[in-house]
Amino acid sequence: MKRRTFVGLTGAAVAAVAGRGALAQTAAAAPADPAQTATLPEATRRWRTFELRTDVRLPADAGASKLWLPLPNPQDTAYQRELGVAWEGNASHVEVRRDPVYGAPALYAQWDASVKSPALTTRAWAATRDRWVDLRASDGPYKLAPEERLRWLAATPHIPTDGIVRDTALKAITEAPRDPVAQARALFDWIIANTYRNPKTVGCGTGDIRFMLESGDLGGKCADLNPLFVGMARSIGIPARDVYGVRVADSKFWKSLGKSGDITRAQHCRAEFHDPRFGWVPVDPADVRKIILEEAPGTLLPMDDPRVEMARRKLFGFWEMNWVGYNNANDLTLSPPAARPLNFFMYPRAETASGPLDPYDPAAFQYSMNAREIVG
């Protein structure tokens, strides 16, 4: 078996991750109300450390094969820090690669045709803490560089910003003041009121927002509903982007918004928009619709249910960080290029001599993912 570690995190150091200086958990527990988070002193905001393990076993007759695994975002933020990645297996070559446009990180592995039963186990570590932006008072300015602003206003094949997307956005903000936060809130509320979570949607959806609007079928999952917010926001001049990642722990607030242990099917897309007074503001209208459908199994919660009202209030400006973010990439080309471009990158991708494997069928693909919190 070959073994290798990146970012200087050795196997012996894994046990010490939870105690790393500023990343260590503090004595103060996370507040019951996420709105309290921003009022706490910086030193008492609680960091949590997670290990994400992915096991891949390709078919014994796979032949020459390639694999791309999404990794935690290496860019440190106030709510997430990447701590390292390690691997072991019989791959002929392994390295960390990034796509050429968005810089989405991937652990890329390849096997020569001579390798029988290709296998790889990876461990990635990240620290997170709850994210909340106080929209009551600006602490800006937060100005985007011109190239960043253009990027997060640009259309992509699955997130167009003209035609029915812009027309729908303009109707949604008719009564909103000419203010980015007020208009983004109007879009957020429109999506909650007009879309629905479809449990039959494969994976997290396709993110084809023009098709959704033109067909009139506004059902889907997170990679449909949150990109719809992003496309509508961009269409009216508000920079916005998706953030693709995976849930790694149970939620403190909603039963339906967490997953621990086996996270093979726990991928989740979030969204954020930019306001020069507040910077990037986290939102998640898709999770409000998830709460409506799944918080009380067998019951579709009404909009005036307290659990839904809390979600509508909190999930505009707040992310509970029982989730690890991977990247902001839409309609991307992996590095090295895969057989076809991707709508988004938050599932393992593999290609064998027989062609691409289905990332939405982990049993046939033969991969599993597991998350554990490192406490100590």
Image (tube, helix red, strand yellow):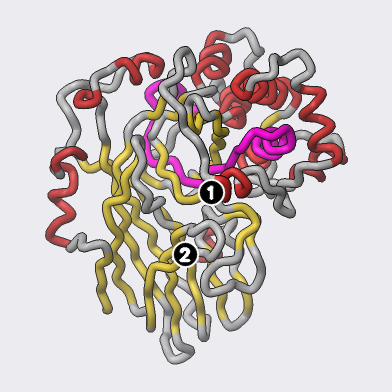
Which label number is shown at residue 9? none
Q: Is residue 235 one of those drawn in magenta?
A: yes
For disc 2, the neighbor class at 10 Å (few under 14, some 14 to 19, many from 20) is some
- Residue 98 disc label: 2
Neighbours of disc 1 within 10 Å: few (<14), some (14-19), many (20+): many
Specify whether 323 is left or right of 1.
right
Vertical comparison of 323 with 353: above or below = above
Upstream in the sequence, badge 2 or badge 1? 2
Camera-side residue of 334 and 297: 334
Count of numbered badges drawn on the protein: 2
Residue 112: x percent and y percent?
45, 87
Q: Can residue 299 be seen in this view?
A: no
Amino acid residing under circle 2:
Arg
Q: In which quarter of the image is residue 195?
A: top right
Q: Does dot 1 land on a helix, a strand or a loop?
A: loop
Residue plotted at (29% across, 42% down): 127
Q: Name the residue under label 1.
A: 328
What percent of the width, then of the height, locates residue 70? 46, 58
What is the secondary structure assignment of the residue under circle 2?
strand
From this view, report whether residue 188 is shown above or below residue 350: above
**Is residue 217 something that shows in the picture?**
yes
User: Relative to residue 83, is residue 199 depicted above or below?
Assistant: above
* Left or right relative to 152: residue 133: left
- What is the quadrant of residue 13 in the picture? bottom left
Please tell me which residue is depicted at 26% across the width and 26% down the height of the picture.
Answer: 45
Q: In this view, does 86 lie above or below 171?
A: below
Q: Where is residue 21 in the image (x, y as percent from the top left)?
A: 14, 41
Is residue 184 or residue 142 the one in the foreground? 142
Q: What stretch is highlighted in magenta?
A: 228-256
The residue at the point 63 percent across, 47 percent down is 150
Q: Is residue 175 left or right of residue 278?
A: right
Q: Quadrant of the C terminus?
A: top left
